[in-house]
């Protein structure tokens, strides 16, 4: 029995894409329209049989395990014939369809924080299997159609009597002439080599809803891979990857921002304008604002997916301590400390209940 890998000119470790590429090349060289020689037609059948086995993951696994090469010298039939006799393999299965459903596809796209918050419509380019434009999925050349297999009379299988350990049994096998389809394509389409589909790039409009985040998937029914024989397409899944923002940090539908202010601004209080996703917003610092103080700005966070309302923006204050003081600045600060009755080396250990960590923790658990 011929080695299917050797027939296609590939190795046992070849990928499914490499096997498909090898088959298409041979099919174009060997189909009857190009070379009507009977020997070449027989070679074409061998190539088609090899591809049918190696392109199907289950059949390929069985073949690699020796499913069609096990002995049988004492019984006249192969190992699978004996198993069919025990487990009902002799029953009629009928022809298998040429048209099969296509697989789902997945593509990842990046969106920035603003697009994730408010949603956006995006054009994406995908490469997938589409119906062959030349044969419209039939796999046949010039408007022809598959013809009923004369070997199996359209049943897709042949029967034979084999000797086994339980005596003579009738077994059924997929027809070698038509590979179990019940029909044959005598003149394969040159564009798709009889598969009924080709690879093509296409542009698709995707509507990304407001509130998405990394890992969310948008399902687009029927926009995936077209199946063999021009079968129905699978679905396309668009997975969201959110880009990192320059200064805003997302936590669910809450946004966080760190705002540095001077010691004077924190002590006296002030209003600072910052840029949010909605544009400029005012942050009001009360006199005596401490480093680590969280300031809540309602409704300026992320849109909640499928709800439409908004989360909050939390601004975390960081008070900047001045460094490299001039002599005049140092003199002013010492005078300020004297006026408050403070000493330059004065410090106090504070308990956890009043620490900055408890304040931040309280914000995160509201």
Image (cartoon, grey):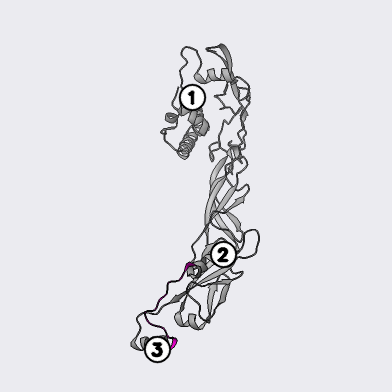
Q: CA distance from mark 3 to mark 1?
A: 95 Å
Q: Could you tell me how far apart the alpha carbons at marks 2 and 3 are, in whole angstroms? A: 43 Å
User: Is 341 in front, or is 171?
Assistant: 341
Image spot of residue 88 (x, y percent): 60, 20
Residue 70 falls within the magenta-colored stretch: no
Q: Read off the residue under disc 2.
A: 254
On screen, residue 177 above or below 190:
above
**In the rendered image, which quarter contains the C terminus?**
bottom right
- Position of residue 271 measured from the top left corner of the image (x, y, whole percent): 54, 80
Depth order, front residue of 250/296: 296
Location of residue 335 in the rendering, given as x and y in whole percent from the top left corner: 40, 89
Helix, strand or loop at disc 2?
Answer: strand
**Would you say residue 90 is visible in this rendering?**
yes
Q: Residue at x 61, y 50 (%)?
A: 219
Q: Secondary structure at mark 1?
A: loop
- Could you tell me how far apart the alpha carbons at marks 2 and 1 are, in whole angstroms? 58 Å
Q: Residues within 10 Å of mark 3 (few under 14, many from 20)?
A: few
From what the image shows, is residue 162 above or below residue 65?
above
Residue 343 inside the magenta-drawn segment:
yes
Tell which circle, 2 or 3, labels the residue nearer the N-terminal end.
2
Residue range highlighted in magenta:
338-352
For the stretch drawn in magenta, the main secondary structure is loop
Q: Which of the numbered marks, if any, corresponds to residue 123?
A: none
Label 2: few (<14), some (14–19) or many (≥20) C-alpha neighbours in 10 Å: many
Q: Which mark is residue 67?
A: 1
Label for residue 335?
3
């Amino acid at each position: 029995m011929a080695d299917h890998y050797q027939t296609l000119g590939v190795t046992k470790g070849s990928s499914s894409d490499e096997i498909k590429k090898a088959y298409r090349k041979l099919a174009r060289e060997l189909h009857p329209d190009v070379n009507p020689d009977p020997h070449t037609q027989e070679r074409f059948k061998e190539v088609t049989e090899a591809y049918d086995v190696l392109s199907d993951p289950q059949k390929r696994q069985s073949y690699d395990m020796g499913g069609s090469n096990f002995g049988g010298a004492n019984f006249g039939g192969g190992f699978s014939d004996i198993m069919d006799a025990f487990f009902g393999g002799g029953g009629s299965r009928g022809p298998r369809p040429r048209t099969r459903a296509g697989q789902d596809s997945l593509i990842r796209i990046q969106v920035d924080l603003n697009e994730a918050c408010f949603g956006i419509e995006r054009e994406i380019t995908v490469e997938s299997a589409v119906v062959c434009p030349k044969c419209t999925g039939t796999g046949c050349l010039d408007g022809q159609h598959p013809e009923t297999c004369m070997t199996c009379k359209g049943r897709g299988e042949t029967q034979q009597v084999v000797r086994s350990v339980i005596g003579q049994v009738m077994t059924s096998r997929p027809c070698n002439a038509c590979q179990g389809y019940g029909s044959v394509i005598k003149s394969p389409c040159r564009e798709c080599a009889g598969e009924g589909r080709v690879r093509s790039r296409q542009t698709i409009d995707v509507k990304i809803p407001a509130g998405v985040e990394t890992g969310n998937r948008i399902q687009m029914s029927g926009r995936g891979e077209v199946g063999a024989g021009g079968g129905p397409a699978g679905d396309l899944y668009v997975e969201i990857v959110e880009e990192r923002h320059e200064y805003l940090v997302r936590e669910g539908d809450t946004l966080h921002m760190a705002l540095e202010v001077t010691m004077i601004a924190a002590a006296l209080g002030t209003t600072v304008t910052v840029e949010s996703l909605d544009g400029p917003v005012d942050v009001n610092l009360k006199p005596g604002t401490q480093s680590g103080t969280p300031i809540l700005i309602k409704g300026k966070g992320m849109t909640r997916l499928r709800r439409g309302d908004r989360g909050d923006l939390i601004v975390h204050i960081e008070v900047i301590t001045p460094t490299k003081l001039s002599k005049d600045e140092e003199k002013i600060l010492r005078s300020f400390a004297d006026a408050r009755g403070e000493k330059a080396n004065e410090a106090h250990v504070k308990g956890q209940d009043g620490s900055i960590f408890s304040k931040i923790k309280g914000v995160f658990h509201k």
